[in-house]
Image (cartoon, rainbow, N blue to C red):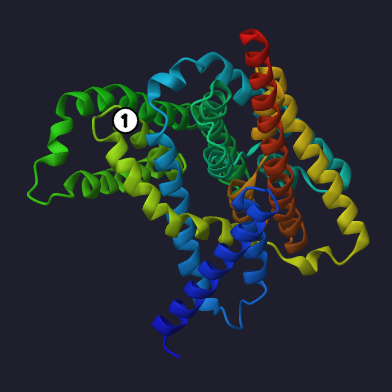
Amino acid sequence: MSHSAEALVSLTIAFGAALIGGEVSMRLKLPAVVGQIFAGIAVGRLVGGLVSESSVEFLKLLGELGATFLLFLVGLETPFAQIGKVGKDAFKVALLGVLIPFILGYGFSLLWGQGSVQSLFVASAFIATSAGITAKVLQELGVLNERFSQVVLGAAVIDDILAMLVLSVVSATASGKGISALSLVWLLAQSIGFLIVCLTLGRGFAKKNERLLDKPKNPLSPWSLSILLCLTFAAFATYFGLAAIIGAFVVGMILAETEYQHWIQEKVIDLNEFIVPFFFIVTGMSIDLEAFSNPSTIGILGLMTLLAIVGKFLGGYLGCKEDSSIVGVAMVPRGEVGVIVASLAQGLGVITKGVYSLLVGMSILTTVFAVPILGILIKKRDHSKLNSNSVAAD
């Protein structure tokens, strides 16, 4: 079978599994992402068989694009003015959500018997937050415009800057290169500078020149150019030391303040129905079930996951006074970000395959735990709010 044929078969299997997993999950009153992650675990078992090894990289690329366009859509639904109103709470949530999990992760890893460098990577995986997964759940529940969602999304952006900064230091330490205080300051300045320039000059230019999107002869030019902008900002974000999804989120927020917001948003929703499920499929594919055949390993995974949940929950709960439980749970999923940290550590030869699988397992379990709990808390909040309004009306 040719490579193109293998890729097409793998694409069909992965997308079909995502549709089935999402449907089953929704029938169980859970967000679709839970079923799609488990579908990814099932697809991962087929690698080397129906899903070829050579096609895995192709699926990973689609997964990265899925995460990028998911955050682009979230940005389109979240004008910057809304995020700006909750900046103080978002910063506190992000800061505490980095400090508390890092301390817990590092201390746990040392007590577990890992070395200092290995423990730094475990701690780095603890501080990650999957903006993509949390954003998708908030979107499915229709609460992106609520204040707590703005706090969570704002904290996720700040969290990403802090996490990438920590990861850069840890990676340099592990590779033996080291990193100077000047390099650290420069890295932070680049990341913050990128965001400031985008959200000041970028917003100003977009507001004054939004009609440029409609200048080309192609009647779909606003859509085509918005896709180009999304990919461009995502690429620039990686250049400045941030995740690609942050660049996509930022340009989405900029375009959200133009007259084309809703028109572009509708078309991105259609695109995301195809591309975003691959992000969750690939997240599920990353886990190696054989690594958990040992009962003691399961015990370590359970304790690791518990500490990871507690650390992030406390950061969100203590950092935000309003809807603190919802914010705390929303910051818990590690998802693909935790997997990326684990993959980087394994690539540097710092951690064993067993530790890698534990970190990936923790990333998946925190997601599987947080997603349904988040849905329950939000529905309970809406129900209480409805009852309060009814009482007030009477």
| Residue displayed at 72% across by 66% down | 288
Left or right of residue 90: residue 225: left
| Residue displayed at 76% across by 55% down | 358
| Figure check: 42 above or below 173 | below
How crowded pointer 1 is (Cα within 10 Å; few <14, some 14-19, many 20+) is rated as many
| Residue displayed at 61% across by 18% down | 92
> 306 or 18: nearer the eye?
18
Could you tell me residue 122's position as x and y percent? Answer: 72, 45
Residue 109 in view (yes/no): no
Residue 278 in view (yes/no): yes
Left or right of residue 312: residue 81: left
Dividing the picture into quarters, in which one does residue 119 lie? top right
| Figure check: 166 above or below 299 | above
> 116 or 52: nearer the eye?
52
| Residue displayed at 81% across by 48% down | 114
The quadrant of the rendering that contains the N terminus is bottom left
The quadrant of the rendering that contains the C terminus is top right
Q: Secondary structure at mark 1?
A: helix
Could you tell me residue 294's position as x and y percent? Answer: 89, 64
How many discs mark residues in the rendered view?
1
Q: Which residue is mark 1?
A: 254
Could you tell me residue 218's position as x and y percent? Answer: 11, 52
Could you tell me residue 373's position as x and y percent? Answer: 73, 38
Tell me the amino acid under the disc marked 1.
Answer: Ile
> 352 or 265: nearer the eye?
265
Looking at the image, the residue that sits furthest to the bottom is 1
Dividing the picture into quarters, in which one does residue 7 lie? bottom left
Looking at the image, the residue that sits furthest to the front is 394
Left or right of residue 75: residue 174: right
Looking at the image, the residue that sits furthest to the right is 295
